[in-house]
Amino acid sequence: MMKILLTLFSLWLGGGAETNASQWKNDVLDSVAKADVANCTQYPKMSNLDAQFLCEDLLIKVSNSLYKNWLNGGDRAAKAQYIAEWWSTEDTSSLKNPLVRLHLAALLGQSGFGDVTEQREYARKHLFSGNELIQGNAIIAIGWVGNCDDVKSIVTIINMEQEGIAEEAVLSLLTLRGPRKSLSLLTELSGNVKRESLRKFIEKQLSSFG
């Protein structure tokens, strides 16, 4: 779980050759088409485990294609417009699956693309999902589309100390509130958590801006 989240985080911050919006759109839709062929819109409600694992892989590839070259690939406004269109599409496709749709919400929030109330409510609905991948994506999204009222939910998730999920919630808190406003809360959390690896993770975040 943590490996997947860190992969997405590195794609978000990472580089790659500059890609114009049209090529980026085509790459995303190519990944979506492959997921659609496997009927991944239904994930995770699948009785066949092989199909479920296949769709996890294909939907993660869709998410990766969204993040690849997002920050430094040029044409950010055009890309944000495409994401807004995909969010609003009535077509039934893998873009509607929570694994992907939550990333659309996150990127709309990150791009500053107007009112994100709808995206926030969607992310909140999945914050305590029983599917770790969906929950992790909701935590990522709420960091970008949430507000101060969501801090309590994020802290609750951190206090559950679930490996990977709690760490993602720490990063989401930092995104949502910013390092300065998160300092005292994270310091308090680091003193209370029982899992040593989580405590060290929080302390590492604190040391990076303290």
Image: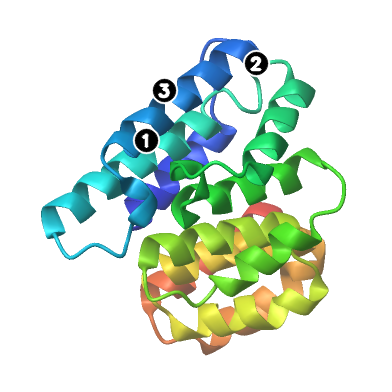
**In this rendering, would 153 be left or right of 146?**
left
Give the labeled residue for mark 1: 61
Q: How many numbered marks, from 0 up?
A: 3
Q: Is residue 33 visible?
A: yes
How far across and down, in percent of the image, does residue 84 sit?
72, 38
For mark 3, give the secondary structure.
helix
Q: Mark 3 packing: few (<14 Cα in 10 Å), some, or many (20+)?
A: some
Q: CA distance from mark 1 to mark 2?
A: 18 Å
| Colour pattern of the rendering | rainbow
Choose mark 3 or mark 2, whichever is in front.
3
For mark 1, give the secondary structure.
helix
Give the labeled residue for mark 3: 30
Q: Amino acid at mark 1?
A: Lys
Give the labeled residue for mark 2: 21
Kindly identify the residue that appears in the image at 76 percent across and 38 percent down: 111
CB atoms of marks 3 and 2 within 8 Å: no
Q: Nearer the viewer, residue 18 or 36?
A: 36
CB atoms of marks 1 and 2 within 8 Å: no
Q: Amino acid at mark 3?
A: Asp
- Determine whether 91 is above or below 66 in the image: below
Kindly identify the residue that appears in the image at 70 percent across and 15 percent down: 74
Kindly identify the residue that appears in the image at 62 percent across and 75 percent down: 154
Q: Amino acid at mark 2?
A: Ala
- Give whichever of discs 3 and 1 has the lower sequence position: 3
For mark 2, give the secondary structure.
helix
